[in-house]
Image (cartoon, grey):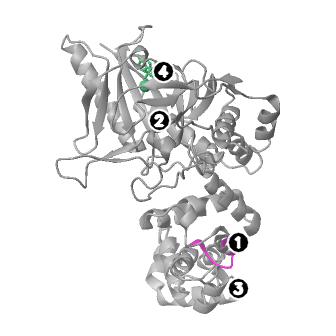
Amino acid sequence: MQWETVIGLEIHAQLATQSKIFSASSTQYGAEPNTQANAVDLGMPGVLPVLNREAVRMAVKFALATNAEIGRHNVFSRKNYFYPDLPKGYQISQMSLPIVGNGVVSVELEDGVVKEVGLTRAHLEEDAGKSVHEDFHDATGVDLNRAGTPLLEIVSEPDMRSAKEAVAYAKKIHSIVRYIEICDGNMQEGSFRCDANVSIRPAGEARLGTRSEIKNVNSFRFLERAINFEVERQIDILESGGQVVQETRLYDADKDETRSMRSKEEANDYRYFPDPDLLPVQIEEELIESIRKTLPELPDARRARFMSALELSEYDAGVMTSDRYTADYFEAVVKKSGASAKLACSWISGELFSRLNKDGLELNASPVDADRFSQLVERVHDNTISGKIAKEVLDKMWSGADTADQVIEKEGLRQISDSSEIEKMIDDVIAANPDQVAEYKSGKDKLLAYFVGQVMKASRGKANPGELNKLLQEKLKG
Ligand code: ADP
Ligand code: MG
């Protein structure tokens, strides 16, 4: 039997507001437990929530960025359940009238294919607190700092057909929310988390299979693994004659498996009803237009521009627009260095990224900023130094504060392009290797590389490779 995988994601993006969605408490991450929760967040009786205008603006911005419908009239509802980290006994969320309706996101897959994934909706809600298990013996602590932090829950259609597609979609949403600066995207801190709904069905079947929902996956790698594990588990069940039960599961990264958490509740179980403490939200055209003006160039448009105006390949354009910071860095380097986009891109995605990777750094924490980096690329572009030397220069820049030019001067690394100087070195090498010269002349062309190597060595890597090759071939012929 051939099985088809079906995946829909619910992504919780923490909105980057200063204060909470219904109170003035700070949303800053990492404070002492319970120092950022006021009477509203604690669910004290008699207090009233006040909606944070900024959270509304951010949700509308997301709708504009994904060509989604805007819920001009949207309503907050109470989702009732008990949990120690939810003192009110309900979460304020949106049910039948969310702030964002149907939209669509195009997702680039590995093979260059672009897939459109439907957005069902996105709604505003408050986060719950956290139960803390680590620091307590036989007890659980409750930290309500996170209670009331604004979330945008982004729900996709069940359009993904593999773990890889689901990851590509999640990455795209991650990139969009960061581009439009509504979420910092920090997955370790829980600012961006995914619930994966997974089912399988016989290939060709139109009806959806029974799904399980894997909660709170907080890395793309885990998302892929959790889905793959879940697909295998469901196939095993169905092929051995069993039935998948609809349930909520947890992914355990240490064991690389999913485990049942609870049987799946239905919307009815929550007794949703409109929150009488909050008015419906009316979104006016004027507000939408003012938010539209704050939209930056989005990743898709920027990618297309990098391909058409800068002649980057589709792949390179994708890498250079994977997040806004990278795209800004790249554009600054192209502009300042005067080099081709292709050269700038290859230095950024190659030498720069590999050093950042090695040091576990994000680009915005790079020891070499776009300004200093562009001078390095400029010196490769204008042939002051070869690519090989440029790597050495970059190493020096990485651990110090010197500019590329300062390193080149101090270390005497300027490329030798003067042909008489190179010719002299070639003559010396030819004179010192009569046997190899004879072999070369008798047809052993491969020896050319040997001569290039010898001259390079004599020049301490500084001979202009193009010039060297040209002169060497002339000399060997003569
Ligand atoms: P709930 O809010 O109870 O989790 P929804 O019906 O709103 O349920 O669906 C949540 C997510 O689950 C959506 O992303 C949707 O695309 C996805 N989904 C629904 N049914 C299936 C299914 N059979 N297989 C995979 N994903 C599904
Ligand atoms: Mg759900």
Instruction: Please give the residue where the numbered disc 2 appears in the rendered image.
Output: 45
- Mark 4 or 1, nearer chain start: 4
Secondary structure state at the residue bearing disc 3: loop
Instruction: Please give the residue where the numbered disc 4 appears in the rendered image.
Output: 158
Residue 342 x %, y %: 66, 57
CB atoms of marks 1 and 2 within 8 Å: no
Instruction: Please give the residue where the numbered disc 3 appears in the rendered image.
Output: 418
Q: Amino acid at mark 2?
A: Pro
Q: CA distance from mark 2 to mark 3?
A: 83 Å
Indicate which quadrant contains ligand 2: top left
- Mark 1 or 2, nearer chain start: 2
Q: CA distance from mark 1 to mark 2?
A: 65 Å
Q: Badge 1: how crowded within 10 Å, few (<14), some, or many (20+)?
A: many
Q: Nearer the viewer, residue 2 or 81?
A: 81
In this picture, which residue range is highlighted in magenta? 378-387
Residue 396 x %, y %: 53, 81
- Mark 4 or 3, nearer chain start: 4
Instruction: Please give the residue where the numbered disc 1 appears in the rendered image.
Output: 378
Residue 164 x %, y %: 43, 34
